[in-house]
Image (cartoon, rainbow, N blue to C red):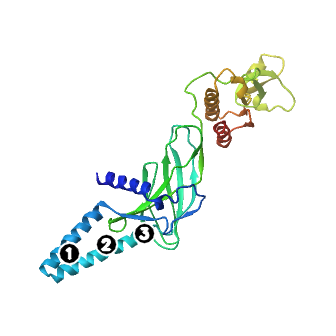
């Protein structure tokens, strides 16, 4: 309940005080926190502690109790000092880079935030993004990596949401925070269709076989000079007038799947993208080579995750 009231108070302050909206425009990295963009408010515990100090002060003055007055002053000085410590716990932090992983629309996108210190120790610092909070600490002149995830809803370029750095260290009496608006977007891959027909294959892309010295027996043929003696079928040759040699075969590799945007003209725009994404996923799962033709881009045949990522990025960038 107290957290909800504090959150509403912060939202009200952001709307009413122009200084709090000064840094709401997207910023290029790196972003450094300084005194003009760090804000401090008392926490719920801080308000209660302040009320307690007021009661102690009134009682000490009323009864002329010097010891109680001294204790009240010491606690007040400690609380005031904690406000400065909370400010310095954020001051000098620098957000260097943000690395985004790969994500399909509807799945969480993993972000790695690289934060470094400017010469002092930073303890119990929290970073909040898209409703998720992660704590970290940085040694003097050190750096830290914070991993968080954000939700995705659609394919294409997705701007990163605002990032909140905050702390209530050391006593929990004050909350210091700052908002970061990195000017960075992440590419979200399209979601593949659940089921559908296989990709069209070339007419000659059958399980063709070629003869070679392998493990699977293919046929017997006449002996030729230079054939290894261990491949001679002695028992069968004994019933014939000439030597017969074992020959072997294995399936010849399939040709690359030619995934062509033009072959799906009967489908709407997003349905084409979803089907091509499914075909690319099937090719990656089978280790099959594939190529991709799109209206503004053509990707040569290839295989492996790098090729798959390149094709999915091309689908995600389609208008």
Q: Residue 39's x, y, as percent?
A: 43, 64
Q: How many marks?
A: 3
Q: How crowded is mark 1: few (under 14 residues within 10 Å), some or many (20 or more)?
A: some
Task: Determine contact: label 3, label 2, CB under 8 Å.
Answer: no
Q: Residue 79: which numbered mark, if any?
A: 2
Apparent side of residue 178 relative to residue 202 in the rendered image (left or right): left
Q: Which residue is drawn at 18% across and 82% down?
A: 67
Apparent side of residue 41 relative to residue 116 in the rendered image (left or right): left
Q: Residue 162's x, y, as percent?
A: 50, 52
Q: In 3D space, how far apart are the residues under numbered discs 3 and 2 (Cα atoms)?
A: 13 Å
Q: Residue 6: which numbered mark, if any?
A: none
Q: Which of marks 1 and 3 is in front?
A: 1
Q: Could you tell me which secondary element the residue under label 1 belongs to?
A: helix
Q: Residue 247's x, y, as percent?
A: 77, 26
Displayed quadrant of residue 79:
bottom left
| Residue 232 visible in rendering | no
Given residues 259 and 61, the one toward you in this image is 61
Q: Residue 57: which numbered mark, if any?
A: 1
Q: Considering only vertical position in the picture, is 206 above or below 67? A: above
Question: Closer to the N terminus: mark 3 or mark 2?
Answer: 2
Circle 3 residue: 87
Question: Closer to the N terminus: mark 1 or mark 3?
Answer: 1
Q: Residues within 10 Å of mark 3 (few under 14, many from 20)?
A: many
Question: Closer to the N terminus: mark 1 or mark 2?
Answer: 1
Q: Residue furthest left?
A: 63
Given residues 187 and 159, the one toward you in this image is 159
Displayed quadrant of residue 318:
top right
């Amino acid at each position: 309940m107290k957290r909800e009231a504090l959150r509403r108070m912060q939202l009200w302050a952001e709307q009413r005080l122009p200084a709090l909206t000064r840094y709401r425009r997207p910023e290029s990295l790196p972003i450094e926190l300084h005194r003009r963009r760090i804000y401090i408010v008392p926490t719920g515990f801080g308000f209660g502690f302040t009320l307690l100090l007021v009661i102690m002060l009134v009682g000490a003055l009323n009864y002329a109790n010097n010891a109680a007055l001294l204790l009240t002053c010491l606690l007040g000085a400690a609380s005031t000092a904690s406000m400065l410590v909370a400010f310095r716990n954020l001051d000098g932090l620098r957000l260097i880079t943000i690395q985004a992983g790969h994500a399909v629309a509807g799945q969480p996108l993993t972000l790695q935030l690289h934060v470094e210190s400017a010469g002092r120790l930073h303890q119990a610092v929290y970073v909040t993004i898209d409703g998720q909070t992660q704590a970290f600490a940085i040694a003097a002149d050190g750096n830290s990596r914070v991993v968080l995830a954000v939700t995705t809803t659609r394919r294409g370029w997705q701007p990163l949401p605002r990032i909140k750095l905050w702390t209530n260290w050391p006593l929990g009496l004050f909350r210091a925070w700052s908002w970061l608006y990195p000017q960075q977007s992440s590419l979200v891959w399209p979601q593949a269709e659940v089921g559908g027909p296989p990709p069209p294959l070339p007419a000659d892309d059958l399980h063709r076989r070629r003869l070679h010295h392998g493990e699977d027996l293919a046929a017997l043929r006449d002996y030729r000079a230079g054939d290894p003696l261990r491949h001679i079928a002695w028992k069968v040759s004994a019933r014939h007038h000439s030597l017969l040699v074992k020959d072997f075969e294995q399936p010849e590799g399939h040709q690359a799947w030619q995934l062509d945007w033009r072959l799906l003209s009967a489908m709407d725009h997003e349905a084409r993208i979803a089907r091509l994404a499914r075909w690319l996923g099937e090719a990656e799962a089978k280790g099959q080579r594939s190529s991709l033709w799109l209206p503004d881009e053509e990707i040569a045949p290839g295989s492996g995750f790098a090729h798959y990522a390149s094709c999915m990025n091309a689908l995600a960038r389609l208008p």
